[in-house]
Image (spheres, rainbow, N blue to C red):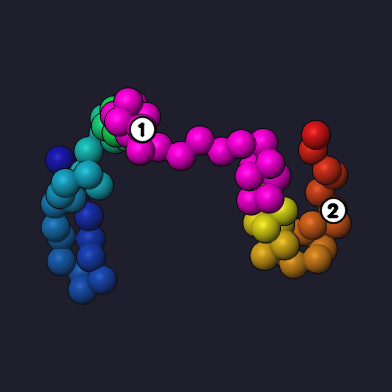
Amino acid sequence: MSINNNHEGRIRPRRGFAGMDPERQKEIARQGGRAAHAMGLAHEFTPEEARHARAKSLGARGPAAAASTPPQE
């Protein structure tokens, strides 16, 4: 179990998901993704939605970030 210092200087063991091995965290996340897709609850982006999300993300960073990134096809 990992040990973590909190803001008051006390030593506390890391608990739950944060205290797990990173590989174990990935496996749990992978299983959740598979289950969501199997149940039909996961969202799959269309190419159009992905372009819109990318443009929105770059726009939030400011005009310099959007101008310096080449368009992707």
Q: Nearer the viewer, residue 7 or 15?
A: 15
* Foreground label between 1 and 2: 1
**Quadrant of image for the N terminus:** top left
Residue at disc 2, secondary structure: helix
Place of residue 11 in the rendered image (x, y in percent of width and height, measured from the top left): 15, 60
The residue identified by callout 1 is 40
Mark 1 or 2 closer to N-term? 1
The residue identified by callout 2 is 68
Label 2 CA crowd tier, 10 Å (few <14, some 14–19, many 20+): few
Image: 57 above or below 62 = above
Place of residue 6 in the rendered image (x, y in percent of width and height, measured from the top left): 23, 65
58 on left or right of 44: right
Residue 39 is drawn in which quadrant?
Answer: top left
12 on left or right of 26: left
Amino acid on which the number 1 mark rests in the picture = Gly
**Quadrant of image for the C terminus:** top right
- Segment tinted magenta in the rendering: 33-53
- Judged by its main secondary structure, the magenta piece is helix
Residue shown at 67% from the left, 36% from the top: 47
Image: 28 above or below 71 = above
Q: Label for residue 59?
A: none
Place of residue 13 in the rendered image (x, y in percent of width and height, measured from the top left): 14, 52
On the question of residue 24 being in view, the answer is yes
Amino acid on which the number 2 mark rests in the picture = Ser
Residue shown at 68% from the left, 50% from the top: 52
Residue 22 is drawn in which quadrant?
Answer: top left
* Residue located farthest toward the bottom when viewing the structure as drawn: 8
Residue at disc 1, secondary structure: loop
Q: Nearer the viewer, residue 19 or 58?
A: 58
